[in-house]
Image (cartoon, rainbow, N blue to C red):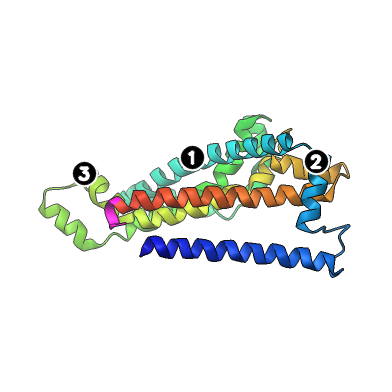
Amino acid sequence: MRSGSRMGDAMWGLAGILIVLAAWELATRLGAIDPTIFPGPIAAIRSAAQRLPASVFLDNMAWSLFRVVGGFILGAVAGTVIGFAAGWYRGFGYFARPLIELLRPIPPLAWIPLAIIWFGLGEPSKFFIVFLGAFFPIVTSAYHGITHVDPSLIRASRSFGLKGLGMLFHVGIPASAPDLATGLRIGWGLSFGVLVAAELIAANRGLGFMIMNERTSGGSVSVIIVGILLIGLLNLVTDAALAAFIRRWIGRWHGG
């Protein structure tokens, strides 16, 4: 039943995307949108393919995905560990929570100068910016999950002799897995959201670089549009894969 529901949701989502693309194409053909500044999807893809070979788009997609995955993994590990520790150990939480709340509202773009100073112009600075996009929703979700574990589970585990790390790993983490899963999904999406900002740092490859390079060099609007669409498509496909992994992971503890 759940599998059928997820399949239905996916089909409706795909239908919605196709409707938007069709409406966009129709609007440009009817003259409702100026195709010189906002070409339709078919014209944009055709023009972009004429300007750049497919290998260039694939190479830029691979580099962007590499940076997103690298920064996200760092953010997921740090956010999960710190969030669980801050919620499980009250003393550490008193120290960590105010610091997290102080830094959380700062947009990743504001960290670019410091990222360059600390990590230089190479890949570590780009990982750092993506890391920031992923870290804060994950640490917040992990903290919320671990601090809202059902007290009856805690009492029951104590009656079986569990305590300390044993209780954390066998009760706390499994019970807070749904909250953590939400944070992981949000963090993955925000990692793509800050990708263009990360690739402003002296990048010569990546979808964000390709988009900004076309803008500054007075290049093709079609390449910019296709680059934006590729970021969205890459996020859509990889998010679906992440969601499937999370469902399998949580299913071990929460009955699917």
Sequence-earlier tag: 2 or 1: 1
Ranked by sequence position, the earlier of labels 2 and 3 is 3
Locate the C terminus and report the quarter of the image it occupies.
bottom left
Span colored in magenta = 252-256
Q: Residue at x 78, y 44 (%)?
A: 212
- In screen coordinates, is 128 left or right of 152? right
Please give left or right for residue 128 compared with residue 215 in the image.
left
Residue 131 locus on image (x, y percent): 55, 42
10 Å crowding of disc 3: few (<14), some (14-19), many (20+): few
Cα distance between the residues tagged 2 and 1: 28 Å
Q: Quadrant location of residue 114?
A: top right
Of residues 235 and 40, the one drawn nearer to the viewer in this rendering = 40
Q: In the picture, residue 150 is in which quadrant?
A: bottom left
User: Majority secondary structure of the magenta segment?
Assistant: helix
* Residue type highlighted by circle 3: Gly
Does dot 2 land on a helix, a strand or a loop? helix
The residue wearing badge 2 is 213
Residue bearing mark 3: 166
- Mark 2 vs mark 3, CA separation in Å: 52 Å
Decide if residue 245 is on the left or right side of residue 252.
right
Q: Which mark is residue 73?
A: 1
Instruction: Look at the picture and state if 40 lies above or below 53.
Output: below
Location of residue 231 in the rendering, given as x and y in whole percent from the top left corner: 65, 48
The answer to if 253 sits in the magenta stretch is yes
Residue 120 picture quarter: top right
Q: Is residue 15 above or below residue 106?
A: below
